[in-house]
Protein backbone atom coordinates (compact mmCIF):
# COMPACT_ATOMS: atom_id res chain seq x y z
CA UNK A 1 0.00 0.00 0.00
CA UNK A 2 1.17 3.51 -0.76
CA UNK A 3 1.00 6.68 1.32
CA UNK A 4 -2.36 7.82 -0.06
CA UNK A 5 -4.10 4.54 0.64
CA UNK A 6 -2.57 4.35 4.13
CA UNK A 7 -3.59 7.94 4.84
CA UNK A 8 -7.14 7.43 3.59
CA UNK A 9 -7.44 4.36 5.83
CA UNK A 10 -6.00 5.97 8.97
CA UNK A 11 -7.94 9.25 8.52
CA UNK A 12 -11.15 7.30 9.25
CA UNK A 13 -9.94 7.17 12.87
CA UNK A 14 -9.34 10.92 13.34
CA UNK A 15 -12.78 11.64 14.89
CA UNK A 16 -12.14 8.96 17.54
CA UNK A 17 -8.58 10.20 18.14
CA UNK A 18 -9.97 13.70 18.77
CA UNK A 19 -12.39 12.24 21.34
CA UNK A 20 -9.60 10.38 23.12
CA UNK A 21 -6.93 13.11 23.09
CA UNK A 22 -9.22 16.06 23.87
CA UNK A 23 -9.54 15.34 27.60
CA UNK A 24 -5.75 15.44 27.95
CA UNK A 25 -5.45 18.84 26.28
CA UNK A 26 -8.55 20.63 27.60
CA UNK A 27 -9.70 21.65 31.06
CA UNK A 28 -12.77 23.47 32.34
CA UNK A 29 -12.36 27.23 32.60
CA UNK A 30 -12.49 28.89 36.02
CA UNK A 31 -15.86 30.42 36.92
CA UNK A 32 -14.84 34.05 36.28
CA UNK A 33 -13.56 33.26 32.79
CA UNK A 34 -16.75 31.38 32.01
CA UNK A 35 -18.95 34.15 33.38
CA UNK A 36 -17.07 37.12 31.90
CA UNK A 37 -15.18 35.85 28.84
CA UNK A 38 -17.47 33.24 27.18
CA UNK A 39 -14.85 30.59 27.97
CA UNK A 40 -15.89 27.09 28.94
CA UNK A 41 -12.73 25.15 28.10
CA UNK A 42 -9.05 26.09 28.10
CA UNK A 43 -6.34 24.35 26.10
CA UNK A 44 -3.52 23.46 28.45
CA UNK A 45 -0.88 25.39 26.53
CA UNK A 46 -0.49 28.87 25.12
CA UNK A 47 0.98 27.69 21.81
CA UNK A 48 -0.18 25.48 18.97
CA UNK A 49 0.13 21.82 19.82
CA UNK A 50 1.12 19.48 17.01
CA UNK A 51 -0.09 15.91 17.40
CA UNK A 52 1.34 13.19 15.18
CA UNK A 53 -0.99 10.21 14.75
CA UNK A 54 0.08 6.67 14.00
CA UNK A 55 -2.67 4.09 13.57
CA UNK A 56 -1.55 0.47 13.30
CA UNK A 57 -3.72 -2.19 11.75
CA UNK A 58 -5.45 -4.61 14.10
CA UNK A 59 -3.44 -7.52 12.68
CA UNK A 60 -0.30 -6.14 14.34
CA UNK A 61 -1.79 -6.02 17.83
CA UNK A 62 -1.10 -9.62 18.91
CA UNK A 63 2.56 -9.35 17.96
CA UNK A 64 3.27 -5.70 18.87
CA UNK A 65 0.67 -4.71 21.49
CA UNK A 66 2.35 -2.92 24.40
CA UNK A 67 4.97 -1.44 22.05
CA UNK A 68 5.20 1.46 19.65
CA UNK A 69 7.18 1.53 16.43
CA UNK A 70 8.37 4.50 14.41
CA UNK A 71 9.79 3.90 10.93
CA UNK A 72 13.50 4.77 10.91
CA UNK A 73 14.09 4.74 7.15
CA UNK A 74 12.39 4.24 3.79
CA UNK A 75 13.90 2.59 0.74
CA UNK A 76 12.97 5.61 -1.41
CA UNK A 77 14.79 8.01 0.96
CA UNK A 78 11.63 9.90 1.95
CA UNK A 79 11.83 11.62 5.32
CA UNK A 80 10.29 9.47 8.05
CA UNK A 81 8.31 10.32 11.15
CA UNK A 82 11.45 9.48 13.15
CA UNK A 83 13.46 12.05 11.15
CA UNK A 84 10.81 14.69 11.75
CA UNK A 85 10.70 13.96 15.48
CA UNK A 86 14.50 14.20 15.69
CA UNK A 87 14.30 17.62 14.01
CA UNK A 88 12.10 18.80 16.89
CA UNK A 89 8.81 18.65 15.01
CA UNK A 90 5.65 17.49 16.75
CA UNK A 91 4.70 17.94 20.40
CA UNK A 92 2.69 14.78 21.03
CA UNK A 93 2.11 11.49 19.26
CA UNK A 94 -1.08 9.48 19.37
CA UNK A 95 -0.24 5.84 18.73
CA UNK A 96 -2.98 3.25 18.57
CA UNK A 97 -3.88 -0.21 17.37
CA UNK A 98 -7.09 -0.01 15.37
CA UNK A 99 -10.17 -2.09 16.01
CA UNK A 100 -11.39 -2.13 12.44
CA UNK A 101 -14.85 -3.49 13.29
CA UNK A 102 -15.69 -0.52 15.53
CA UNK A 103 -13.53 2.37 14.23
CA UNK A 104 -12.02 2.44 17.70
CA UNK A 105 -8.77 1.32 19.31
CA UNK A 106 -7.75 -1.89 21.06
CA UNK A 107 -4.91 -0.02 22.77
CA UNK A 108 -3.55 3.51 22.45
CA UNK A 109 -0.91 5.84 23.88
CA UNK A 110 -0.38 9.59 24.00
CA UNK A 111 3.38 10.16 23.88
CA UNK A 112 5.08 13.41 24.92
CA UNK A 113 7.62 13.84 22.12
CA UNK A 114 9.75 16.24 24.19
CA UNK A 115 10.33 13.41 26.66
CA UNK A 116 10.95 10.96 23.81
CA UNK A 117 13.51 13.35 22.25
CA UNK A 118 15.17 13.82 25.63
CA UNK A 119 15.76 10.07 25.88
CA UNK A 120 16.97 9.88 22.28
CA UNK A 121 19.43 12.71 22.99
CA UNK A 122 20.56 11.22 26.29
CA UNK A 123 21.10 7.83 24.65
CA UNK A 124 23.08 9.33 21.72
CA UNK A 125 20.51 8.91 18.92
CA UNK A 126 20.45 12.61 18.15
CA UNK A 127 21.78 16.01 19.13
CA UNK A 128 19.51 18.47 20.96
CA UNK A 129 17.26 20.43 18.56
Image (tube, rainbow, N blue to C red):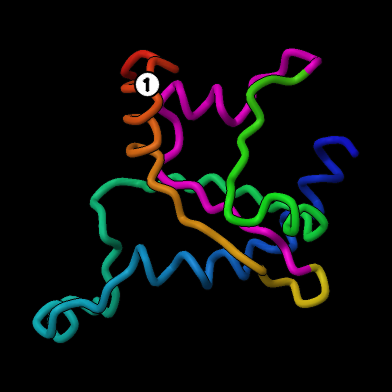
Left or right, 18 with respect to 100, comes to left
Find out whether residue 120 is within the magenta segment.
Answer: no
Q: Position of residue 3 (x, y in %)?
A: 81, 36
Pick out the residue farthest to the right: 1
Quarter of the image for residue 15 reads: bottom right
Q: Position of residue 85 (x, y in %)?
A: 48, 29
Pick out the residue farthest to the front: 63
In this view, 49 is above or below 82 = below
Which image quadrant: the C terminus? top left
Q: Which residue, given by chain and number where applicable, does mark 1 sit on?
A: 123
Packing grade of label 1 (10 A; few <14, some 14-19, many >=20) is few
Q: Nearer the viewer, residue 92 or 117?
A: 117
Label tally? 1
| Secondary structure of the residue carrying numbered label 1 | loop
Quarter of the image for residue 72 reads: top right
Q: Position of residue 59 (x, y in %)?
A: 82, 57
Quarter of the image for residue 83 reads: top right
Which image quadrant: the N terminus? top right
Task: Read off the magenta span.
Answer: 75-99
Q: Residue at x 76, y 46 (%)?
A: 7
Find out whether residue 82 is within the magenta segment.
Answer: yes
Left or right, 20 with respect to 98, comes to left
Q: Residue at x 32, y 30 (%)?
A: 118
Q: Position of residue 81 (x, y in %)?
A: 59, 31
Pick out the residue farthest to the left: 32
Left or right, 37 with respect to 53, comes to left
Q: Residue at x 51, y 70 (%)?
A: 20
Q: Residue at x 68, y 50 (%)?
A: 64
Amino acid sequence: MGYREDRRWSDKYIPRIKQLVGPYLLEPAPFLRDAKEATDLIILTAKDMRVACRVRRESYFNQYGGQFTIRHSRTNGTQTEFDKILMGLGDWMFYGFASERQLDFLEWYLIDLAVFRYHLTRDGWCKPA
